[in-house]
Each structure stands twice: as C-alpha cells, then as structure tokens.
Image (cartoon, helix red, strand yellow):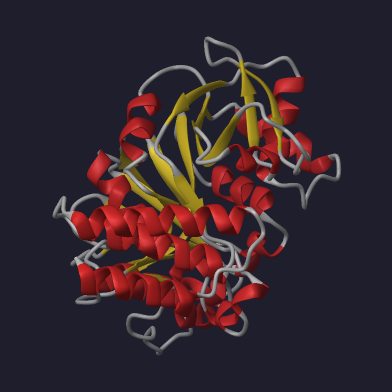
Amino acid sequence: MKFSISGEILVHRREPLLYVCQPRNGRNGPIKGQSPPSNNAFKLSQWYGERAVGISPWSTEASETKGLKVELDMDIILVVLAGGRSTRFGLLSATLPKSALPVYDECTLVRNVRQAQAAGFEEIVVSTRASFVEPVSGLLGAQNLLGQGPSVRVIANEHHESGPLPALLRVLNNLDADRVALSLSDIFFIENAYLSLYKHSQLHDNYLAVADPFDPLELSKGGIVLSDAELCIHSILEKPVAGNTEGVRWTGLAVFDRQLESHLEAFLAAGEVTAPIGNFFEHYLRKGHELRAFRVSDFINVNTPNDMFLASMYRALELHCANDGLRQRLSEVTSSVRLRLLQGQDERPDTSFQRVERLSSTA
C-alpha cells in the first residue's frame, strides 16, 4: 500500500522538513530567484500561492522537482482529524485546535499520536486547518514525534472549515491505501486504545471502536452504538436520546477499507456536508453494508473546560504510579467529579483542587 500526493515538491537542503505543495491550477510555482522561508509550512504555502498539503521527514537532496509523486511503503495509514475549534475555549481556539490545549502535562493531540506510534502505526497523517499547521507541527516536533521513527505528516486541509466529513474525504482523495484507520484528536483514552485499533486494522472487516459507559447516564448523551451479541452493529445514535439505556459509546476510532470513499462522496453530495461522522456510518449501514464493533478502554471527549479538567485528573492518576492511599482517594475524587458533571452539576476546578489538596495532606 502507498501514500501518494501529486503536485509540486520542494526539497530544501539542511531544512528538517520536506514540504509537499499543490500549485494553484498549475500556474504558481516558486518565485524565481527567491528562497523558501525556513521551517514554516504555512508561509511556504503562501510563497507558493497555495496551501501546503503535507509534511514528511527531511531529505538531504537539494533540488526543486516538479510533477513528482511521493510513494512510501506502509501497511496501514492512520488519519488523525485535528481541525476542531471550540468556542467554549474562547480566543484560544482561534490560534490552536482544541486538541492542542494542555491536559495536565500533555495535550490530547500529542497523547493520541504518541499512543498510536507505541501501538505500531508507522504512517500517521494529522489533518488540520492551514492556520494551525505551524503550531501543530511545532508541538509535535517539540515532543520528538516528527522525523524520527514512525512517519508523522501534518497536512493543511481547508475542508475542515466545512466539517469533519469533508475534511476526511479530502484526505482519502489523496491516499493510495487499501485500509485506513481514523482517529479524532480531542479524545483522551484512559488506556491505549490504539493497540486494539492496530490489531483490527490488519483484519478484513470494517470496524468502529466502542467503550462501555462509565455510568448509564452517558448512554443518553449521543454517540451510541447498538450491536448484537456478536458485535455486528445495527444502529448508531449520534444525537442524544433522553432515557436511553442501551448500547455502548463510540470512541471516534474506526478502521475501514478504501471503498468507503465512494460512499462518503455520495453522502456529502446528497447535502450532508455538516453531518457528524456517526451519521455517515449510519448511512453506510442503511445501504446494507456491515460494520463490526470492538471494545477499547474508557475515554473522555474533551469538548469543554470541564472535560479538560476531568481528563487532567485521569492523567494525574496515570502519572501517580504508586498503588497507595493517595491514589485510591484521588481515584474516588475523579469518579465523583465525573458523575457530578454527567448529572449536570458544574464542578469548579478550584473546589476539586482543594479536595485533592486535602487528600494529599492526609495521605
């Protein structure tokens, strides 16, 4: 299987990134006599008159090559969608995707890429908005997740402005692979769910990864998968359903054959551009196709400051390796905070912090 991007490629000696750019209608190329900006994919795209669509580990070859196709051998491509904004994070979401905001000591984007690499994924494509390419690349680079070991590419994808499904289709249009794994960068997995995702990526069926609810209240919040005893999915409830007590939670992880691309194109052409991702998979089921489920760990979907605070508590638990009284009490506080948030009670971070401080002083 191959990853392919056609377009214009510039390899600049001694720079740590290889920029893959698409010229605007084939007219705009490098300005004669000028050198590209150093280490800045977004400025490079402006210099080309178009967006940068890919970043990969650097090359020592010094030449400007037009019309070249990049092909890299791989078994599976993991696509991480990281273009989401959230008005609930205020002005921060104007300069960074919400998945780049810190959860205790690391953001969910870094956590997801780190866990995916540890699980065995060798080719990872992070899709984000053009304005986020530079900070996202810098963030991953600072954690040594770019250019060493498994390949990680950050691509600028203007279709994030329309929604996650158009953005996903844009990425699929530029991939040459038989199997694709999907991840959403704002999910905080309490354990490494990518281990199971990688295992199922080697199989032949199309899968969604699901998790049991922390509390039955979560089953009324939407994003619910209904399946039979053999984990064959028969329905996806994307919208909240009051009083629902059935099903399991979809984690945002999926793995599927490339033939889903044509179904996604038809779904969007029918006017479903702004639909959530779960609606597409429901549509796929209704067309008579099969989806199967597999279980992974519990997770937090970090959409609000309260979600970020809760995920931070789980991260603190993870880092506190000692199986002592403090860990047990911190776990109890974390579970209590999560339940209160599910019940609609606002949990002030400073109040919970004081409760944790009291636990620390008595442990």
**In the image, 177: left or right of 342?**
left
> Which residue appears farthest toward the right when viewing the image?
271
Give the residue at x 52% y 10%.
230
The residue located at (34%, 54%) in the rendering is 331
Report x, y in % for residue 353.
Answer: 39, 75
Q: Is residue 6 above or below residue 210?
A: below
38 lies above or below 128: below
- In the image shown, does 137 or 104 lie closer to the viewer? 104
Q: Position of residue 292 (x, y in %)?
A: 54, 20
For the view shown, which residue lies furthest in the front direction? Answer: 362
Can residue 17 be seen from the camera position used here?
no
Query: Where, quadrant-wise, is the C terminus in this rendering?
Result: bottom left
From the top left corner, tell me how far across and down residue 153 is, in percent: 38, 58
Q: Quadrant of residue 297?
A: top left
Residue 346 visible here: yes
Report whether 211 appears left or right of 263.
Answer: left
Instruction: Please name the residue shown 64% across and 35% down the image.
Output: 224
Counting the numbered discs, the total is: 0
* Residue nearest the observer in this picture, 264 or 26: 264
On screen, residue 148 above or below 52: above
- Quarter of the figure with residue 34: bottom left
